[in-house]
Image (tube, rainbow, N blue to C red):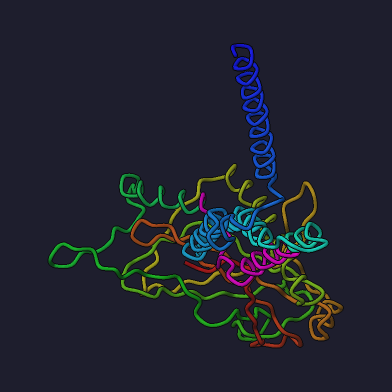
Amino acid sequence: MGKRHEKAWMFALARVIRKSDRVPKESESIQSDKANPLEETPASVPFYESTLLWGALSAVIALVSVYLGFALKDIRWFLAIAWPFCVLVVVSLAKAIRRGRHVHGIRLSIILLGSSLCGFGLWQLARTFPPPSNQDIGQQIDQALKKWNSNSQTGGTTQQPTTTSNGTTPLVRSYLVMDGVPRFTGKSASATEGSNFQPGDALAFNLHFSELGSNAIFIGGGAMEILPEPDYRPETLETAYRTFLENRKADKELRANQHKEKWNLFTPSSPRWDSVFAFDRSAGRPPTPHILTQPDLDKLRSGTLVAVVFVVIDYKDGGAIHHFWLCNFLQPPAQSPGIWHGFDVCPNSD
């Protein structure tokens, strides 16, 4: 009896061991199936409840909202950061496709197409809502710091804001504006402006300015130049603007070595005018006014030579520095008083 009980006990123990060996194999196969991200069971979380989907979508909405909220500043690089999150949204949506003969190929196609559409949409958004000027955030911070320090650095050369009877500062400022269009400077018997050009005249126009507002302003440095161009297509005007900026930088460096910039008082009762010239430039020599020839006049009339005028003037109002910009071109046949057109390559005046 003892041996029989011993054998029965051994057989029962062997059955338990075999049964316990089968359980881990089944659990391991289940875990291996769940560990494969490409093979999802029907009991998994639906794609529309996925944390990946809503987390990435929230990031896209937040970044695009920040861009629209700061559209007056050039922070379009936010849109570049938003694009990877758009890709994550597309990937999350593509994972909703679980069945089919070519499920992996379909998912890959959706991801590629959706990512491309997101990139195009963000690029189109940057084109539709561009910043109105070329000033970046660093320049705006620099201007704010200059305004902050202006009260301690006036030296009698800046106009302090006026105050009302109750001691508050009014939200009224003064502006430097053009008084009419650029005026021809051709020779005339009466020695007055407004006459057409003749051979031997300098290619130049008189610019008249006035002050709009009740406060006195101070006129500082600036640059103005006429650039003769073969036409007035947008790409030609863009190239002319870049040339003007290069010439302005070179002239500013030259003036910095000669004398320090001064600020001159300009009141509403004191009209101001200046002349803008076209220059002949050569390396190593100072620019000289361009003298018109008969072929030049013929080209101005026929439209194969277009006078493009660029003007930028710095001025102060209430201690803050502002900028006047003028970008015009003279439409053929270039006869006084002329037909002038503005174009929006230059920054906005402020």
Q: Is any atom of residue 75 visible in this view?
A: no
Residue placed at 31% from the left, 73% from the top? Answer: 214
Say above or below: 16 vs 244: above
Residue 198 found in image quarter: bottom right
Say above or below: 264 vs 170: above
Q: Is any atom of residue 159 visible in this view?
A: yes
Q: In front here: 246 or 76?
A: 76
Give the left or right position of residue 172, taking residue 201 as reference.
left
Assess whether residue 267 is covered by the magenta stretch.
no
Q: Main secondary structure of the magenta part?
A: helix
Say above or below: 184 vs 84: below
Q: Position of residue 86 (x, y in %)?
A: 63, 59
Q: In front here: 267 or 120?
A: 120
Q: Quadrant of the N terminus?
A: top right
Give the left or right position of residue 305, taking residue 66 as reference.
right
Residue placed at 63% from the left, 29% from the top? Answer: 20
Give the left or right position of residue 107, taking residue 342 as reference.
right
Q: Position of residue 168 (x, y in %)?
A: 19, 63
Q: Position of residue 256 (x, y in %)?
A: 57, 45
Q: Residue furthest front?
A: 1
Q: In front here: 163 or 255?
A: 163
Stretch of the chain drawn in magenta: 113-138
Q: Position of residue 321 (x, y in %)?
A: 43, 57
Residue placed at 47% from the left, 71% from the top? Answer: 272
Assess whether residue 128 is covered by the magenta stretch.
yes
Give the total number of marks visible in the rendering: 0
Residue placed at 62% from the left, 46% from the top? Answer: 253
Q: Residue furthest top?
A: 2
Q: Residue furthest left?
A: 166
Q: In front here: 100 or 140?
A: 100
Residue 305 found in image quarter: bottom right
Give the left or right position of residue 99, taking residue 92 as reference.
right
